[in-house]
Amino acid sequence: MSELQAPAGDRALDLSPEELAHSTSPRHVAIIMDGNHRWAKQRHLPGAAGHRAGARNLKPIAQACADRGVEYLTLFAFSTENWNRPSREVKLLLEIMRRVLEEDVDELCEKGVRLKILGDPERFSADLQMLMKRAEQMTRDNSKLTLSLAVNYGGRWDIVAAAREIARAATAGRIDPDSIDESLFQQFLSLGEVPAPDLCIRTGGEHRISNFLLWDLAYSELFFTEAFWPDFDAAALDQAIQAFHDRERRFGRRV
């Protein structure tokens, strides 16, 4: 995986947002949204304020992606490891998730956004699972932007779950084991037919992918920024897209 580091200072971008939208922009952007708690601590606020600020940032970044010609946006919202956080914080994160699913779906429909839920829903309450299915159903015919929220998701879980389903299909005689290749395996992963991310952004200053889309990020460009997620705005997105635009993607080939 290629790594991109955000340049220091406020360097003027070579391309405007309009030019970026018509240049070689990423078709699929994935974001690891990190730094909510540190954003709040920096401002002497409770951690809950950081998570709420992060949730408010979802819509403007989705809109900014759509405006720049991005077709797919995948956000790491709640990992399989997040259950290990303090119970009060987990409860808050689930409440924010519920509020988004209850209050924002109509607006997503108006803006032509299709919502997909990635991950294992079984650990969530029945009413939250129902809201997830409702949101997917309501937005399924939209085509402006596909917004995927990874919740109770882990890259290792995704690969193991796919392998389990393929094994069941092979045992039942629906799949010839000799026909299993990367293309078939991909169909059983959470992203399914969605193309792999071209660009993965991580906010908050950490330089790792933290069990996110392990299979799918094999050839994604990585961009790390010190900005905390609540501070990551359209200008920061443009910086990441500019860096992506400056890269030469060879996919293992010599050019």
Image (cartoon, helix red, strand yellow):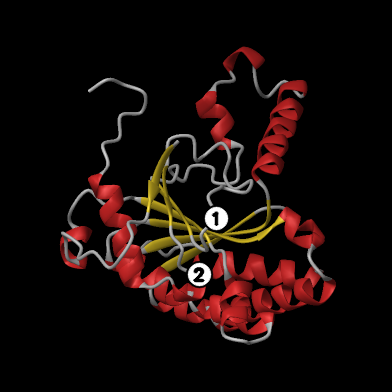
Q: Quadrant of residue 13?
A: bottom left
The relative height of residue 167 versus residue 35 in the rendered view (above or below) is above
User: Which of the image's four quarters has the N terminus?
Assistant: top left
Q: Quadrant of residue 85?
A: bottom right
Find disc 2 in the rendering and name its residue: 228
Q: Earlier in the sequence, mark 1 or mark 2?
A: 1
41, 49: nearer the viewer: 41
Q: Is residue 179 left or right of residue 90?
A: left
Residue 16, x across and y down, in percent? 17, 66
Query: Could you tell me which secondary element the residue under label 1 belongs to?
Result: loop
User: Which of the image's four quarters has the C terminus?
Assistant: top left
177, 30: nearer the viewer: 30
Q: Which residue lies furthest to the front in this view?
A: 9
Q: Residue 149 carries which label?
A: none
Query: Could you tell me which secondary element the residue under label 2 belongs to?
Result: loop
174, 87: nearer the viewer: 87
Find disc 1 in the rendering and name its residue: 206
Q: In which quarter of the image is residue 94?
A: bottom right
Residue 198, x across and y down, in percent? 38, 45
Q: In this view, does 103 lie to the left or right of 90?
A: left
Badge 1 amino acid: Glu
> Residue at the spot x=57%, y=80% of the render?
42
Badge 2 amino acid: Phe
> Residue at the spot x=48%, y=42% of the render?
193
Q: Would residue 112 be seen by someone viewing this image from the given angle?
A: no
Q: Is residue 15 left or right of residue 75?
A: left
Structural crowding at the residue carrying mark 2, measured as other residues with C-alpha within 10 Å and reported as few (<14), some (14–19) or many (≥20): many
> Residue at the spot x=58%, y=84% of the render?
103
Residue 41, x across and y down, in percent? 62, 79
Residue 33, x across and y down, in percent? 54, 63
